[in-house]
Amino acid sequence: FISPELVDVHFLVQEGPLYHVGAITVEGNRSISEKLVRRDLGIATGEPFSQSKIFEGNRQLFLSGYFETVDIHYSSAPAHQMDVHVRVKERPTQYVKGGMGYGTQTKERASVGYEDRNFFGNEKQLDVRAVHSGFLTNPHKYRTTILETSLAQPHFLDTSFQGQTSVSEEWDNRDAYDSRTTSWRTSLGRRFGRSITASLRYRFQGIRISRI
């Protein structure tokens, strides 16, 4: 028994031909290699064309932080193919940073640093910084100097592994003692898909006390 208020609807769907990704071209990249753009895009010539993968590739390229704009256009080609054209505008990858400040514990504080987000290519990220604080207000009690450098590789040896290591030295002058702290941190991880990463981390820290 079917209620007179209900209507059966029948859809007849006829699928069209399956399209595959054809030629992929990249325009506008200068310091970022085309290989890296293609890798973050996440599609390859010959695979079935998917508009959702195009949208996700556009998102990943923009979230990488290397580009101000990302435009992806595609058009049909012979033999049921879709050619994909990627146009990007790069952001600067090298920065010099610095700052001044004051805090109740650190007192006056000055910092300077250098960052290169494409160090020698392949997206390696170098960060070097120096911080000096407490150098005017009772230096024997508050002075601290920190030197730190870190290097990250999001795609270690062009694989899905990612690594990072950092080394720092810290010198502290206090009323009762002086100290020097050496720290080393390193990690190695692997990506499983777009959003899952597993990693191993190791940290070493050594402190030397003097003038007790």
Image (cartoon, rainbow, N blue to C red):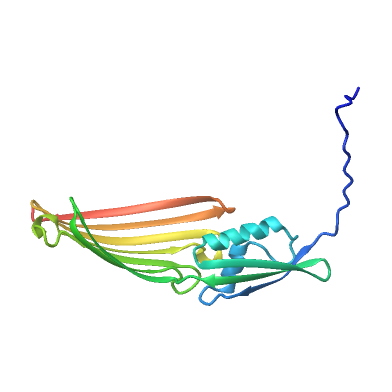
Q: Quadrant of residue 73?
A: bottom right
- The location of residue 38, given as percent across then percent down, is 62, 68
Left or right: residue 194 compared with residue 200: right
Quadrant, the N terminus: top right
Residue reaching furthest to the front: 5
- The location of residue 86, given as percent across then percent down, is 63, 70
Residue reaching furthest to the bottom: 30
Q: Camera-side residue: 3 or 109?
A: 3
Q: Which residue shows up at 46% across the image and 67% down it?
A: 124
Q: Which residue shows up at 10% across the image and 55% down it?
A: 141
Q: Which residue shows up at 50% across the image and 50% down it?
A: 198
24 shown above or below 169: below
Left or right: residue 150 compared with residue 52: left
Q: Camera-side residue: 97 or 202?
A: 97
Q: Quadrant of residue 80?
A: bottom right
130 shown above or below 56: below
Q: Quadrant of residue 4?
A: top right
Q: Which residue shows up at 32% across the image and 62% down it?
A: 167
- The location of residue 121, given as percent across then percent down, is 48, 73
Residue reaching furthest to the right: 1
- The location of residue 56, given as percent across then percent down, is 62, 57
Left or right: residue 37 compared with residue 140: right
| Tally of numbered tags | 0
